[in-house]
Image (cartoon, rainbow, N blue to C red):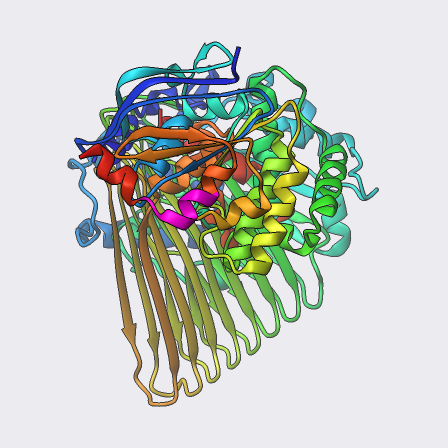
Amino acid sequence: MPLLAIKNLHAEVDGKKILNGVNLTVEKGQVAAIMGPNGSGKSTLAYVLAGKPGYTVTQGQVLLDGEDLLAMEPDERAAKGVFLAFQYPLEIPGVASMTFLRTALNAQRKRRGEPELSTPEFLKRVREVAGRLGIDQEMLRRAVNVGFSGGEKKRNEVLQMALLEPRLAVLDETDSGLDIDALRVVADGVNRLRSPQRSMIVITHYQRLLNYIVPDVVHVLSKGRVVKSGGKDLALELEARGYAEYQDEMV
Amino acid sequence: MPAAQETVEKVRRIDVDQYKYGFVTDIESEKAPKGLNEDTVRFISAKKNEPEWMLEWRLEAFRRWLTMREPKWAKVKYGPIDYQDIYYYSAPKKKALKSLEDVDPEILKTYEKLGIPLREQEILAGVEREDGTRSRVAVDAVFDSVSVATTFKEELAKAGVLFMPISEALQKHPELVRQYLGTVVPITDNFFATLNAAVFSDGSFVYVPPGVRCPMELSTYFRINEQKTGQFERTLIIADKGSYVSYLEGCTAPSRDENQLHAAVVELIALDDAEIKYSTIQNWYPGDAQGKGGVYNFVTKRGECRGPRSKISWTQLETGSAITWKYPSCILRGDNSRGEFYSIAISNGHQQVDSGTKMWHFGKNTSSRIISKGIAAGHSNNTYRGLVTTHRKATGARNFTNCDSLLIGDKCGAHTVPYIEAKNASVVFEHEATTSKISEEMLFYCRQRGLSAEEAVALVVNGFVKDVLQQLPMEFAVEAQKLISISLEGSVG
């Protein structure tokens, strides 16, 4: 059974249809890239998977390891192992990253019926993860994303992902707003988290990111549907020829 | 917007009936007859065995009160109060308690339900903290108008600190009470303060002698219990030259239908180089989901920095009461004196809050700081009302004000009414204010990481109020954080 099975998914935002029958499966341990022009529904797909309020599914089904994902609240999905790395991570003034991480981790553990981590256990875990990703402890004492540079925000997303150990990580335009050095650092962090137990959906407009996070498969999304799937070379092809032909195909 | 709609739906489901502390303790009590006239005042004074001058003082206030009218300028709405339909005095019957063991077990049980005794028992048992020091909080428990238990008295006595019910102070130290009572909040001050002066039943009295740093936090737990008993507390705290004291006040009240009037007066006096820190956690019954019932909290709190270089700091966490009308203020009379006001006011359901502070700058180079965080949810209204004023001779006065409001849902209101008067050219006043809505995006971000809707709101709100929370004494900080979560329960699904 694939980890994620999206079947004929239709969704709208503010009454406007964005997804028009997405079909997609992601195998366990697979890294799938989703590429597509602006407005093709890439971010909408990410939000629908995470359960963002206001994104209404009108038709179709999403199964996570056989379970009906769409029936779950956003925090339930998180506890089930769905993680969304935001394109624009939110700032939470006054809440230290450390507090945020601990609250999130323990909330998930509680929901799964696992014991909450004690402070020393948690600190040990965070230090280990931050160390692995080369993240300064000082960043953890600052309020969540407040005053962070674009690169720091994205690294913070990767840190959260590493700590929460999701089964399915959705990376929404993780490369946007990053210079090449920051991109390398973030991609390196993501690559360290690749494992047979973890599937990833890497959403991006540009092929550039896929030089660093090399996908197993590439899907092209256009006008709310997957219009082409292929190996990693498909990304290069797109880079060379643009999205025009796929957009025309739909007309 | 469906997203905003969802929050609105959630806010509608607010259930303030879940008020955790709504219960009535069954204790026999001794009451004055219902209603208010000169005889009531005489009855209270006689019950307390007060000196003649005190009775005269009360009667003068009462006569004055008869000529006054309820203030109507606050942004709150409520029906007429029948002052003849209130018991002005009610005391648990058992008396002459020597220690906590003598306290009515019913009362102790009440505290237990409130979650108070865990810490209190800890304190009484001398439980050690992680760092090896003992928690040091002296508790003067006020239960329905009479202080029933006072602890740590001996140690305080050793330091020369007087901490006792004001009724006791009137017996033991009448000269001190007479010297200071009514000197910050005069009996003519305002309708509710004047009423309090006439009928106050008890409260706390603190005197810290010159040069003494009070060896522990002083703490009082208030609780209104008897049906239809207005509670009129009178607190008087004097920090003599070069002394320091930190006082904590926390309270809850049982659930009931009738509105309960609470008109307390707190007076603080800081002499030369003295410092008083006064913290409040207010969690009285806010009324039910329809806005019925709940406590009317009409309180006058004022401190005077009488001596040079003195300092008074108010910190408050207001989560309860149907209506809050409260402006803890500082009169900065001494040169180089400083006043501070840190406030978190949370309103949910149909609560109405009109709160803030007044800083009067009279002395030279006086400074004041106001940090106010208002959080409105449900159908509530939350108003910050503040005054910063300088006398023309108060050269070099400075003020910094920061008022932030946070809205949860779109049926509530946040209002900021700052009055600023600078009567000489050398003052520097700064005012910052923001109003924001708790954003759907932020909540979703938290929920995506695994937090429930309620946990997400609590986390964001705790971040919003962090600057003020830090001002609360350690003993209260954790409790305060919990209280914030509890009071916002039901504000989201």
In this orientation, which residue lies closer to the viewer: A142 or B338? A142
- Residue at 51% x, 13% y is A65
The question of residue B189 being in magenta is answered with no
Q: Position of residue B413 (x, y in %)?
A: 23, 45
- Residue at 34% x, 25% y is B16
- Residue at 61% x, 57% y is B207
Count all numbered tags in the image, as a single digit: 0
In this orientation, which residue lies closer to the viewer: A22 or B339? A22
Taking the view exactly as shown, the residue that stands out farthest to the bottom is B425
Tell me the quarter of the picture where residue B370 sits: bottom left
Q: Using the image, determine if residue A85 lies above or below residue B27.
A: below
In this orientation, which residue lies closer to the viewer: B52 or B32? B32
B69 left or right of B15 in image: left
Q: Position of residue B226 (x, y in %)?
A: 40, 24
B440 left or right of A3 in image: left
Q: Position of residue B340 (x, y in %)?
A: 48, 64
Q: Position of residue A230 (x, y in %)?
A: 46, 30
Q: Using the image, determine if residue B476 lies above or below residue A134.
A: above
Tell me the quarter of the picture where residue B173 sits: bottom right
Q: Using the image, determine if residue B96 lies above or below residue B39.
A: above
- Residue at 28% x, 45% y is A244
Q: Using the image, determine if residue B27 lies above or below residue B174.
A: above
Q: Which residues are magenta?
A: A236-243
B267 left or right of B130 in image: left
Residue B144 appearing in the image: no
Which part of the image, by quadrant, shows the N terminus of chain B?
top left
Magenta stretch: dominant secondary structure: helix
Which part of the image, by quadrant, shows the C terminus of chain B?
top left
